[in-house]
Image (cartoon, rainbow, N blue to C red):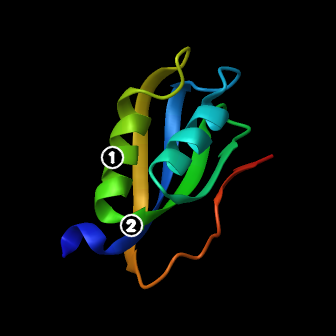
Amino acid sequence: MEGDALICLDFEVFGKVQGVFFRKYTQAEGNRLGLVGWVQNTEEGTVRGHLQGPVDRVREMQQWLQVTGSPKARISRAQFHNEKKIQQLEHERFQIRK
């Protein structure tokens, strides 16, 4: 079943996404969806990360990253790349990287 297949992908979110608890909300949403991976701020003012989990849950997270984010964030765009199918999760949890 397609929804049960595991995928991973990298993401980068642009806009006002630092200093608005974006990483904390991203971690909470990832945990709510049962995803694993990481999120971190970049020196360029974006937020970058990696997601792993079932296809349908990753798609839900992609939508959240594009539209919702943290309450005070202003997302201008989100980019996703390096998507691939995986056989098993490579992370144990969803963490915030400093």
> Measured along the vertical axis of the image, is residue 72 above or below residue 48?
above
Residue that protrudes farthest toward the right in the picture: 98
| Badge 1 element | helix
Residue designated by label 2: 83
Q: What residue do we see at 38% from left, 55% from top?
A: 58
- The three-letter amino acid code for the residue at tag 2 is Glu
- The three-letter amino acid code for the residue at tag 1 is Glu
Q: How far is mark 2 from mark 1, CA to CA?
A: 15 Å
The spot of residue 27 in percent (x, y) is 61, 43
Q: What residue do we see at 51% from left, 41% from top?
A: 29
> Measured along the vertical axis of the image, is residue 29 above or below residue 36?
above
The spot of residue 39 in percent (x, y) is 64, 48
Q: Residue 49 carries which label?
A: none
Rate crowding at label 1 as few (under 14), some (14 to 19) or many (20 or more) other CA atoms within 10 Å.
Answer: few
Quarter of the image that includes the N terminus: bottom left
Residue designated by label 1: 60
The spot of residue 48 in percent (x, y) is 59, 46
| Badge 2 element | strand
